[in-house]
Amino acid sequence: MIGLVLCGGQSKRMGRDKGLLTTSKKVTWAQQCFSVLAKLEIPVVISVNPAQRTQYKRIFPFHDLVMDDQELNIHGPLLGLLSVHQKYPTEDVFVLACDMVEMNPVVLQNLYNLYLHNKGKMTCVFKKDTAAEPLCAIYTTKDLKKIRQWHRKGQLEKFSMNYLLEKLDVLSIDVPVEWKDYFRNYNTLSNVQVYAR
């Protein structure tokens, strides 16, 4: 398994690169999420688009960066996920969006334990108020291959991650009330009040 911090989005509503915003501890959101995933003792990579390469190389070793493969002709988080899958085709992928900057490693460990308990056979997600959290989830190699095949055959009606999860058999953990704040994601500067844990 590898961890994946998704940073390659356009951040249009934020107006600047979310992964490069800093927490109250003066680390970038990308670094904060990287460190949380790394506490699971798995290798972690950062998904970026080509325009981000120069700035992210100043923060992370080049080998930790995976560029979006523009030839996939996919948009959104799925582009980052499948680009990483192409580079690491035998690895299951634990995804964390860079704007879930308040995520707690204990929460991630619970999902990882579910995955291990089921011998890595199924994609595992959190559900908050009955809705899946597709950007804090573990995607199996088997399911990533399936998604890639659907794309090649033109069988993906949309690139929404929630749409894909509806097409897959998944295991889920309901998010208890005391964990809900960890799943906040920040899309505009007006709602950025980060106290990273």
Image (spheres, rainbow, N blue to C red):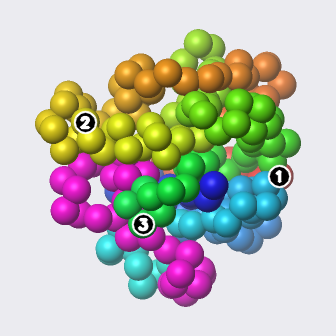
Q: Label 1 vs label 3: CA separation?
A: 31 Å
| Quadrant of the rendering where the N terminus is positioned | bottom right
From the top left corner, tell me how far across and down residue 177 is, in percent.
Answer: 79, 19
In percent of the image, x 83 and y 52: which residue is there?
Answer: 197
Q: Which mark is residue 87?
A: 3
Looking at this view, is 78 or 12 the one in front?
Answer: 78
What type is the residue that disc 2 sits on?
Answer: Trp
Binning the other alpha carbons within 10 Å of mark 1 as few (below 14), some (14 to 19) or many (20 upward) gives some
Q: Which mark is residue 176?
A: none
From the top left corner, tell me how far across and down residue 77 is, in percent.
Answer: 40, 47
Position of 87 with respect to 25 (left or right) is left
Please provide the residue range marked out in magenta.
Answer: 57-84
What type is the residue that disc 3 sits on?
Answer: Lys
Secondary structure type for disc 3: helix
Residue 162's place in the image compared with 78, above or below, is above
Q: Determine which quarter of the picture holds residue 42.
A: bottom right
Residue 186's place in the image compared with 134, above or below, is below
Looking at this view, is 103 or 114 the one in front?
Answer: 114
Look at the numbered discs 2 and 3 and tell me whether their residues touch, using CB distance below 8 Å: no
Give the mark, 1 or 3, whose residue is nearer the N terminus. Answer: 3
Q: Determine which quarter of the picture holds residue 171.
A: top right
Look at the numbered discs 1 and 3 and tell me whether their residues touch, using CB distance below 8 Å: no
Residue beneath disc 1 = 197
Give the mark, 2 or 3, whose residue is nearer the N terminus. Answer: 3
Residue 26 can be seen in this image? yes
Binning the other alpha carbons within 10 Å of mark 3 as few (below 14), some (14 to 19) or many (20 upward) gives few
Q: Which mark is residue 150?
A: 2
From the top left corner, tell me how far across and down residue 93 is, in percent.
Answer: 56, 50
